[in-house]
């Protein structure tokens, strides 16, 4: 770059540190950090606190790297959608190529560092997660099938499994159950969002279920997945990561979640438009609490087991 | 002694450069901390092995 071109940079659009941080999708990272942390602590082995901290940090960084690569590839869609048009690339703060380089570099660093800190099985699964999110979901499924959210949800479901693998170095049914909990939770969570974000996905021509099969089918799907999720979430309570606290939380929240899904299923578009999708918005908010509370309960049960406290 | 005047570009990118500097320092600290933990773990493991023999 010559001196002349350096001076030509648009000053008000100069990327700041926060813009690069925003490429990592910090809100998604909080979910990754929390669920990976639970996976790591729920495992029946103790991990050195510093190793545990490093593992969580690099799992989160790997998640962030895949977020940056997603923003690079989806810059055209992001520019159209109301929810995403202020992201660093459509806002003109960071170029798409910069985001790509940033994402690739961070992916490499996070995988290698996780491997060095814990084991190469965990690092391999992190690498696969990044590949799954960027290539399978972002590049392939998202623009091709209305099942994008269902299969793509696996990418967000891997972190507790990686945490478990980082601690134990092996796979188990409990890790698979934690994976399945997030996997089954993702579709109703995103379809509720798609219902009240209405035209966003239409404008971006993303084949969301609301666009391809209609809003009635989406409401049916939300109910179907919520029923399956409830069965799975409560069944998890009877495994080694469950317990009385987990079961209590699971029963209360799944009853609420199911009731919310039934209300969404019974409503039609006219009723939703009258109150500006209040039921769908509530269901979406509840879905966030739902996941945090379930993993919080697993964490609590792990703490009780670790310190030998028996409740019942 | 006269210091050359700081270029406007450096002022504009100060926050970004400071942030990157802090990230690099944190990275070095993590690698160092990890090395200490791993090496002391290996040493205590080796000692336990010797004692058990």
Image: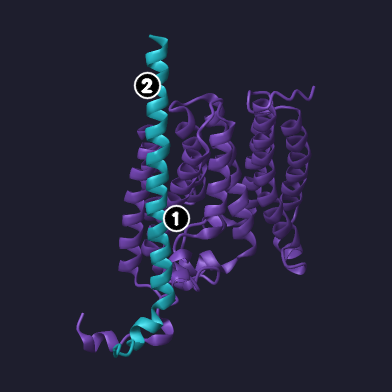
Chain colours: A purple, B cyan
- In this rendered view, identify the residue nearer to me: A128 or A108: A108
Measured as percent of width and height from the top left, residue A218 is found at: 61, 52
Q: Residues under labels 1 and 2: Cα distance? A: 37 Å
Residue A73, quarter of the rendered image: bottom left
Dot 2 crowding, Cα within 10 Å, few <14, some 14–19, many 20+: few
Q: Is residue A173 above or below residue B21?
A: above
For label 2, the residue is: B46
Q: Is residue A72 above or below residue A265?
A: below
**Is residue A137 toward the left or the right of residue A263 in the image?**
left
Residue at the extreme front: B1
**Can you see residue A89?**
no
Dot 1 crowding, Cα within 10 Å, few <14, some 14–19, many 20+: many
Q: Residue at x 52, y 59 (%)?
A: A26
**Can you see residue A291?**
yes
User: Which marked residue is nearer to the observer: mark 1 or mark 2?
Assistant: 2
Mark number, residue A64: 1
Q: Residue at x 29, y 90 (%)?
A: B2
Residue B12, quarter of the rendered image: bottom left
**Is residue A167 toward the left or the right of residue A309 in the image?**
left
Q: Residue at x 52, y 56 (%)?
A: A208
**Is residue A29 toward the left or the right of residue A188 in the image?**
left
Q: Secondary structure at mark 2?
A: helix
Measured as percent of width and height from the top left, residue A152 is found at: 47, 47
Residue A69, quarter of the rendered image: bottom left
Residue at the extreme top: B53
Q: Secondary structure at mark 1?
A: helix
Same-subunit check for callouts 1 and 2 = no
Quadrant the C terminus of chain A occupies: top right
Chain on which label 2 sits: B
- In this rendered view, identify the residue nearer to me: A62 or A149: A62
């Amino acid at each position: 770059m010559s001196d002349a071109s350096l001076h030509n940079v648009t000053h008000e659009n100069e990327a700041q540190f926060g813009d690069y941080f925003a490429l990592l999708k910090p809100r998604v990272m909080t979910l990754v950090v929390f669920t990976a942390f639970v996976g790591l602590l729920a495992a029946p082995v103790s991990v050195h606190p510093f190793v545990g901290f490093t593992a969580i940090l690099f799992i989160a960084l790997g998640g962030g790297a895949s977020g940056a690569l997603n923003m690079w590839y989806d810059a055209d869609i992001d520019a159209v959608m109301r929810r995403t048009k202020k992201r660093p690339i459509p806002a003109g703060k960071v170029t798409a190529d910069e985001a790509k380089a940033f994402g690739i570099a961070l992916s490499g660093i996070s995988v290698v560092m996780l491997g060095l800190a814990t084991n190469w099985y965990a690092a391999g699964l992190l690498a696969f997660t990044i590949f799954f999110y960027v290539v399978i979901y972002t590049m392939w499924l998202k623009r091709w099938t209305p099942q994008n959210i269902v299969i793509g949800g696996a990418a967000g479901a891997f972190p507790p499994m990686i945490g478990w693998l980082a601690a134990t170095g092996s796979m188990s049914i409990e890790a698979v159950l934690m994976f399945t909990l997030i996997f089954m939770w993702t579709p109703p969570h995103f379809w509720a969002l798609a219902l009240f974000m209405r035209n966003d996905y239409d404008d971006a021509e993303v084949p969301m279920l609301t666009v391809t099969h209609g809003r009635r089918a989406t409401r049916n799907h939300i109910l179907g997945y919520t029923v399956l999720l409830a069965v799975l979430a409560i069944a998890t309570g009877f495994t080694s990561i469950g317990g009385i606290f987990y079961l209590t939380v699971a029963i209360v929240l799944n009853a609420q979640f199911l009731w919310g899904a039934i209300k969404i299923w019974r409503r039609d578009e006219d009723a939703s438009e009258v109150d500006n999708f209040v039921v769908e918005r509530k269901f979406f908010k509840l879905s966030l609490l739902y996941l945090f509370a379930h993993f919080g309960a697993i964490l609590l049960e792990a703490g009780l087991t670790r310190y030998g406290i028996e409740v019942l | 002694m006269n210091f050359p005047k700081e270029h406007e570009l450096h002022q504009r990118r100060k926050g970004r450069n400071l942030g990157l500097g802090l990230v690099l320092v944190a990275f070095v600290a993590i690698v160092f901390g990890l090395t200490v933990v791993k090496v002391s773990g290996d040493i205590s493991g080796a000692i336990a092995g010797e004692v058990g023999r």
